[in-house]
Amino acid sequence: MLKVAVGQAEGSDVQELVGRVVGRCLADVDGMAPNVALATLSGGLDPEAVFVALREALPGVPIVGGTSAGDLSSSLGFSEDSLTLTAFFSDRIRFGVGFGEAIAEDPRGAVEQALGRARADLNRDGSAGDETLALVFVDGLSGQAAAVVEHINELRAPGSWVFGGSLAYPWGGPRRVFEFGGERALSGGLAVLLLRGPLRVASRVSNAWRPVGPRERVHTVGDQVMTIGSRTALGFVRHYLGEHFSPSGEFPLAVFDGSSDRFYLRGLGDGAGAESEALTCMASIPDGVEVQLCEYVRDEVLADTTEQVDGVLAAFERGHLAVALVFSCAVRKMMLGTHIREVSELLGERLHVPFAGFYAYGEIAPLVPGGPAFFHNATMITLLLGEEGASAEVDAVAARGRRAAEGEVTGETCDRGALQRKLDRSVAYRARLEDTREQQMAMLRMINAEVEVARQRIAAQNEKLRELNEALARERNTSDALLLNILPRAVADELKRTGRVEPVFYGSVSVLFTDFEGFTRIAKSMTPEELLRELDRYFSAFDAIVERHGLEKLKTIGDAYMCAGGIPAPKEGHELAAVRAAWEMQAYMREMAAAREAEGKAPWRLRIGIHTGPLMAGVIGDQKFAYDIWGDTVNIASRLESTSEPGRINVSETTFAAVRGEFSGEHRGRIKAKNAGEIEMVFIVGPRSSGAA
């Protein structure tokens, strides 16, 4: 039977917070290990550190999810500074997790990558079959969430459900978004959780914004709204909201999909420039569809939320309801203001099962059961999950979720007086800000007419100054970004400061070389585009590994990859860092080889060589800069790589002496290397166990 446990807590210490949240989940199921866990994180904690702590606390359990603009759950309620964990347990339902990268550059490729990995994970035991449900978590800063949904609709299993959200960061918090994809925390990508098995699914979309005025046909170009009806887009909006109104998420467009009453929402933003009559939208609107302007009424939002929750419960019919998942919009959270906590209270009063959700920059859900998913704005999606054939009785986990939602103490220990003061201040401050905002809007309407004449007089001067400042900033950012792309930051700073970089002697540096076995043969069997795409995938993964272990990437030449530890800033332990990075590279290659073999493709095999010794490092060239290293250490590392074997790490005795406490090795003896004589070589066998001598 499908069981779901939810834990949510606030805190500033990563380890302590993760321990509390995981402990709360596992306590609800008597310590049973979950199949998969969904984690959302709002607030100022480091997402990567939280992800690492979660993986340590739940070894072997895939973690999927990411950052949000706020969380809500049956465990704690609403919070803009919390960690929420939803753990799934089932012996009949299978789970698969995958991630895709760089959706801004290639959204379809990222979707294919994520679904491919998730399906491989779903069928890792040799079973087969299509997924029943897909939960998708997309980077909300990429601008590609709607495109991702379009590609998922093309690639999803027939009849499967697709839900999710565009991951966010809290207002006022660090501008960073991370996705959790099983074994990776990444940024700029997407994570996918697939479920297959006897699932019972029901959902509802709560729009709540009230359409006003007539429906009009829209003319769009990409994400630009050019005209609405007979007016320009800006003219249409200002016709209803006033001459000086600036479009915002508070007044979205209802986009009708062809039926008489069914629609999804698109938030509007400013046009392409000061004189533009076009408007941008948060995601594209099909050209030629009907739209209608919407207004926000708080009481109607809460009433519609109640109606939608009751409706989805009725649609679920009889059976075992295990959990409710909620995907809601950050704009909706902002507009509800101090009433936002009423949403989690309402869910607790009606659902009586564990629930968890997060606030996003857009929501993903179908409008009809099993139909294609839509990318929504300003909505709230309620998704109910259960298992076919399971008892309709409320189990212990559900009962605990109900009691938590109804106000039972969940084990949080705190100074209740201090907590109450904090809550009172929060309510008072937010209420005052809302009142001030309404007063400011009224005042702005009064003074806009007075400032219009002055605005026109200085507009020309400001435009010239803006263009000049933007041009200077673009040039500066371009040159800085280019310099940091080819030189280490310390070297780039020295070059900008002095105009030159002095060569530096290093007494001990670990140099790592890689290349692919039979690359010439591989290259002949692939198109240039396929070859470059595959190389980019591997080298991008190596870049992440190298950065994670504090190494410095130097260059790639064809299929060869070169990096080093201990430069440009000398530091202890660079030998271990290099070997750890090499071990992780080979682990990644084994994973990719398995995936390619599962697809009937020939695997790529990697050779690695590492040597430690002295060398010189510096910048060559005065037009096209390049940071490089020279000396016998570099040559020997190259020879170690060429005399390695596919899938293995070949190190010199010098390097092995520094890492033998952590890694075991297979001594190869002295082997002749081209132009380097005989070298004492060792194959790295693997990390030593904690109890090994």
Image: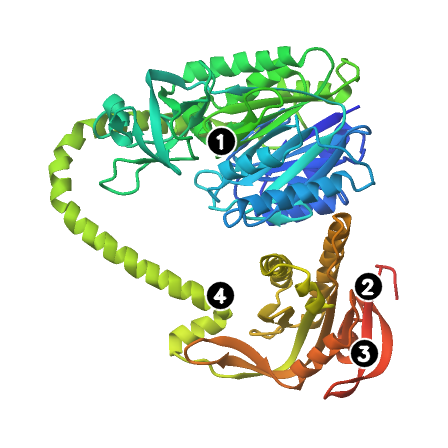
Say what amino acid the circle numbered 2 marks: Gly
The residue positioned 47% from the left and 46% from the top of the image is 174
| Place of residue 192 in the rendered image (x, y in percent of width and height, measured from the top left) | 64, 38
Q: Earlier in the sequence, mark 1 or mark 4?
A: 1
**Mark 1 or mark 2, which is nearer to you?**
2
Q: Which mark is residue 485?
A: 4
Q: Earlier in the sequence, mark 4 or mark 3?
A: 4
| Place of residue 222 in the rendered image (x, y in percent of width and height, measured from the top left) | 40, 38
**Could you give the CA–CA distance between mark 1 and mark 2, rounded to whole angstroms?**
51 Å
Q: What secondary structure is found at the residue carrying circle 1?
A: helix
**Toward which corner of the image does residue 92 lie, by quadrant?**
top right
Pointer 1: what residue?
422
**Could you give the CA–CA distance between mark 4 and mark 3, rounded to whole angstroms?**
34 Å
Front-most of residues 274 and 533: 533
Q: What secondary structure is found at the residue carrying circle 3?
A: strand
Q: Which mark is residue 686?
A: 2
**Could you give the CA–CA distance between mark 3 and mark 2, rounded to whole angstroms?**
15 Å
Horizontal side of residue 302 vs 412, given as left or right: left
Horizontal side of residue 84 vs 582, given as left or right: left
Front-most of residues 30 and 574: 574
Q: Earlier in the sequence, mark 1 or mark 2?
A: 1
| Place of residue 102 in the rendered image (x, y in percent of width and height, measured from the top left) | 55, 50
Examine the rendered structure and indicate whether residue 566 appears above or below residue 130. Answer: below
Say what amino acid the circle numbered 1 marks: Lys
**Toward which corner of the image does residue 519 lie, by quadrant?**
bottom right
Pointer 3: what residue?
681
Contact flag, marks 3 and 2 (Cβ < 8 Å): no
